Each structure stands twice: as C-alpha cells, then as structure tokens.
Image (tube, rainbow, N blue to C red):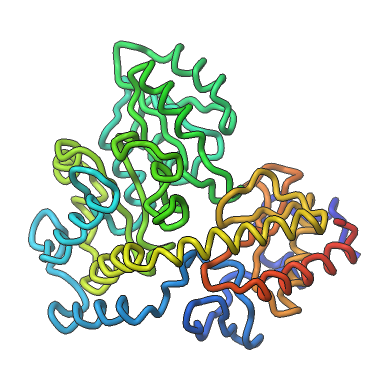
Amino acid sequence: MVTSQSMPHGPWDVEYFKANGLYFHLVEVTEIAPGSARVHVKDRGEMLMFGSYSYLGLIGHPAINAAAHAAIEAFGTGTNGVRLLAGTLPLHNELEASIAAFKGAEAAIAFASGYIANISTIAALLDRHDTVICDKLDHASIVDGCLLSGAKMVRFRHNDLEQLEERLEKADARHRKMVIVDGVYSMDGDIADLPGIKALCTQHDALLMVDEAHSLGVLGATGTGIEEHFGLPADTIDIKMGTFSKAIPSVGGFVAGSAEMVTALKHKARGFIYSAALPPASAAASIAGLQVIREEPERVRSLQHTFGHFLTTLKAAGFDVLSSQAAIAPIICGTPELATRLMMHCVDHGVFVQAILPPVVPAGLARLRATVTANHTIEDIDHAVDVMTAGARKLGIL
C-alpha cells in the first residue's frame, strides 16, 4: 500500500505515478462527440467528460466549423508572418472589432495564446518604477507577466479586500499602480469581488486588469462576463483579458480596453510583435464563436443551471467544494494520494476528471477539478456524482 508519506514532494514524478497506477495525463482523446459532453479516449472508449474547458459545448458547432473551413479556402492554413509586418488579414481586424463589441470596449488586440496575452500586456504596461498587486490565486501567466515587467509585485490574500486596501495604501503614489485578478478562479471556481475591487482601485487611482479566461461565456445573463454578472458598466475594467480556447472553441488570447492602450500594445507588446499571427481558421472560428454566444444565450442559461445542480448534489453528498460559484468545482480530497486514487476510480468508471496537486494548489487541498458544460444533462451530473461519491466513501474521503 502506498502511503501519503511515500508520495513525492512535487506533482510530476511521472514514473512514480505511472508505477502506482495513478497517472492520467497526456491521454489521447480520439473523438469528441457533438457538444463535447462525451469523448472517446484511447484504450478506454467512451467517457463522460468533466475535464473540458468547452463550457458552452461549442466544439463541433456547425456554424463555427463552417467559418473555419471558409477561412482555409480563402486564406490557407497560415499567414505571411507577424501581425505588425505582413501577417494581418481582414479576419484579424474583424476579430478584434468583434471582441471590442462583445466586451463593450473601444478596441481590442488578439494574441497567439492567453498566456502570451497576459505576459505581454503586463510587461508592456508596467516597468520597474510601478507597483502591481495580485490576488494570491491569480493564474501563473499573470505571475510570470508581473515578474517579466520588473515592477514591484505584491500579493494579497484571495478575495481579501481589507488586505488589498493595505497594499494599495503602501504603494508608491508617484508611479503607476495596477491591480490584477481573475474573473473566475481556475482552480477554485469562485468569482472575484469586482464591485469591491473596483471601488478600491478608483479610490487609490489604480488601474484594474481582469483575466476573464474562465468567465467569458460563463458569467452574466448573456455570457459577456464579470461586469454583466455584477450589473456594472462596461467600462468598469480598464484592461479586459480573455481567451479563445475555452467557451470559444479555438485558440488565442485577447486584451480589450481603450483605443490608446490597444494601439500602444500593438507597437510595444513583444508577444504580439514577435509571434506569428493567428491562423485564419482560428480567427474565423473565434469570430463565429462570439456570434454564437450572442445568438444562443440559452447555452449560458443551461450551463448556469446545470452547474448549480452539480454543486448542490456534491454538497449534499458531503463533498467540500470550497466557495465555488461558476463552472469549476474543486472536490477537495486532502492528500495527493487520495486525490489521484479518487481520480482513477472515476476514470475506471467512465468519468473523465483529473486530480490537481500541490504546488499547483496549496498543501492539504489536493483535489479533483471537475468542470461542467452546457451540454451535460442532469442525468450526466447525477451519474458522475454517484461515481465520485462511491469512490470517496471507499477511500475514506467521505
């Protein structure tokens, strides 16, 4: 029997996990059923997917597929290079206009990935004289961007407005201050306190940047994100970051905001200047994805309803799901061994879900990270929770 004491200190001692039958990463998904609630996995067959970022179930949507095909027919599979030189197509300009309209901003800039969007934007807007203040649970790309910028980086306890205020009061008032938070936190599923954070930023003359990778398509009555969720004006957030690889089934990242800022980023952000332009099919798929979200708001309602049932059912079974509110449920197991063993129990019973271990999450909070999509049925949810509950009882988690 493997004990928690014999577990490796880091999460990626690959041979250890493979030797103990606890490795379920880099698996081949060989087929995605329409709507993405079910997938086929190499050597395992059909599985019920609870690890997908396709929150609105748009993978394979006919309008999005058709747009991608049409873009390939018109422009091929690549571009002539970087956007600033020969790589800008009409599709790129149309995509940026679509993002700006969707997010209620003056302008937008598209990047090759969400990671590149964050590190490039933060590094371009801040320098060593400035102060950047981050939530302790901010995404790794935000942390990397802050380090790359050279700015003084300070952090505050997760969603702790009192400590955020202390950090703002201590920041050098002679130079720029920027607060950066996630809209929906990718490992906990809870939502940033945008009204409170914005009030503090206004009071202390600080810029506000929000990473909406996991809130676009998820929050708000029509899926436009965290401002809509809280009923706040579209100019509440100064720097709006998001991705095209989650609710939108494509690839890339974006930043939206003032026209002045976007122009500056297009001529200063190294990840934009030195990265190849988005492929035509990806740009077209993203444009179509934004349009589908607008035209099919019932998908957003379905996601929110289904996820609410998921949380309620998990809590009724006795699981600790922290303060999750949107699309992502952290199912706390405690030790890495318990989390990986519960993961494998689910996998063996046809439920695709993965374990998240320290240092990605704090010690003692190893978990399953389960995501819900608009195309999960109530029956899918109930079955998955039954499988999780049986495994958790067998392992002594419940």
Residue 12 in sight from this viewpoint: no
Residue located 32% across and 62% down the image: 294
Residue 234 spot, x, y in % from top left: 30, 40
As drawn, 53 above or below 162: below
Residue 314 in sight from this viewpoint: yes
Front in this rendered view, residue 80 or 121: 121
Q: Is residue 130 left or right of residue 368?
A: left
Residue 244 spot, x, y in % from top left: 35, 61
Residue located 33% across and 18% down the image: 205
User: Where is the N terminus found, in terms of image quarters?
Assistant: bottom right
Q: Is residue 105 left or right of residue 370?
A: left
Residue located 90% across and 66% down the image: 394
As drawn, 19 above or below 83: below
Residue 251 spot, x, y in % from top left: 35, 65
- Residue 333 falls in which quadrant of the image? bottom right
User: Where is the C terminus found, in terms of image quarters?
Assistant: bottom right
Residue 277 spot, x, y in % from top left: 20, 62
- Residue 210 falls in which quadrant of the image? top left
Q: Is residue 207 left or right of residue 356?
A: left
